[in-house]
Image: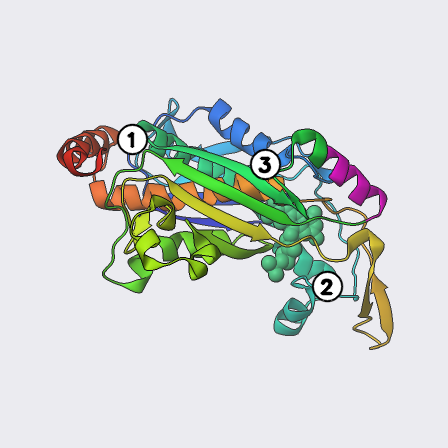
Amino acid sequence: MLRYLTAGESHGESLACILEGLPAGLAVSPIDIRRELSRRRAAPGRSARQKKETDSFKVLSGMNRGVTTGAPVAILIPNAAAGKISPSYVPRPGHADLPGMLKYGLDAALVRERASARHTACVSALGAFALRLLAETGARFASRVVRLSMTENPSPEEARELIARAAADGDTLGGVFELICSGLPAGLGSHVHHDRRLGARLGAALLGINGIKGLEIGGGFDLASWKGTLAARDRRVSGGLDGGMTNGGDLVLRCAMKPVPGVEAGAPSFDARSGKPAISRSATSDVTAVYAAAVVAEHAAALELAGAMVEKFGGDTMSEIKERVRLWRKKTEKLIGR
Ligand SMILES: Cc1cc2nc3c(=O)[nH]c(=O)nc-3n(C[C@H](O)[C@H](O)[C@H](O)COP(=O)(O)O)c2cc1C
């Protein structure tokens, strides 16, 4: 079982995270971790804050000379933008502010601190370990934005233009991104219980990312209009999962992300102290978080898949896992080609 916890707030001193259940013998370099952190931080459309963040981190435990030991991996990620938070009693509609204020008795500014997506830097740092584990067993990840606001498959130039226009309007953009993982062995996950189905596990991981509002697996919502005769012949239906298990095909997932609600343009709200109408405003938001979320989603999905890999192939060391994957592929390749 692979599990992780994150802690930390947007403007707190540091983020902290622990990944437990990794086998020993997985080589992960500081370059691997920095690359994944910077893919997230420097994605198109991000706010000025990201220029302040340095992607510095410290691995506190679980590694010896760049290789995992089997002990929990703990990482500290200092916040360059740490500092005092001025209280705000005007909740932003479409954010955790109001339900969080009611639930925990905090002002809106304190709720924002943990509800912020800053903690997803932890997912990216730990995702570097999951991506390495998957790569060692022959699986590769890729992600791409397939819709930015109303534009399908935006080129980098189109995206730049859309982002610049939204920034000039003080507005934000949502979109859809696609994740593809190829080279996964068949048989990860299980059909036997709802919480062991790999689609459900990936769904929880991806819908757990701030702002993700929809998930499609393979043919997704389009499948509602297909006929069964076609569905039985076309591999795009499954998106790499049948009955809650990998089937040896490419895993294809799509996520819809909402635009960050309100922000600079302002949104009608109220002052929680007086109950009187007020406008909530923030000038520090990402113009679009879709590109960064695609990277975080790769990492969140990779952590889930690495967990499923460790469960299926067991082993306390990477060499045990790799040998078992090799034998499994040999056994299954006659039937499914890998
Ligand atoms: C990588 C990433 C970056 C984000 N950046 C911002 C941001 O700059 N400002 C903001 O208000 N929300 C940002 N969000 C989205 C909000 O966290 C999200 O809209 C909010 O949590 C409410 O969405 P929910 O109801 O899905 O939790 C970001 C999300 C992700 C994944």
N-terminal-most mark, 2 or 1: 2
Q: Is mark 3 within 8 Å of ligand 1?
A: yes
Foreground pick, 166 / 19: 166
Does the magenta segment cover residue 224? Answer: no
- Mark-to-mark CA distance, 2 and 3: 26 Å
**Up/down of 38 relative to 219, above or below:** above
Residue 10 in view, yes or no: no
Which stretch did the figure color magenta?
Answer: 160-170
- Mark-to-mark CA distance, 1 and 3: 24 Å
- For the C terminus, the quadrant is top left
SS label for mark 3: helix
Q: Report which residue position mark 1 lands on.
A: 137
Q: Which mark is residue 108?
A: 2
Q: Report which residue position mark 3 lands on.
A: 40
Mark 3 packing: few (<14 Cα in 10 Å), some, or many (20+)?
A: many
Q: Amino acid at mark 3?
A: Arg
Residue 107 location, quadrant: bottom right
SS label for mark 1: loop
In this picture, residue 142 sits left or right of residue 246: right
Q: Amino acid at mark 1?
A: Thr
In this picture, residue 248 sits left or right of residue 118: left
SS label for mark 2: helix
Q: Amino acid at mark 2?
A: Ala
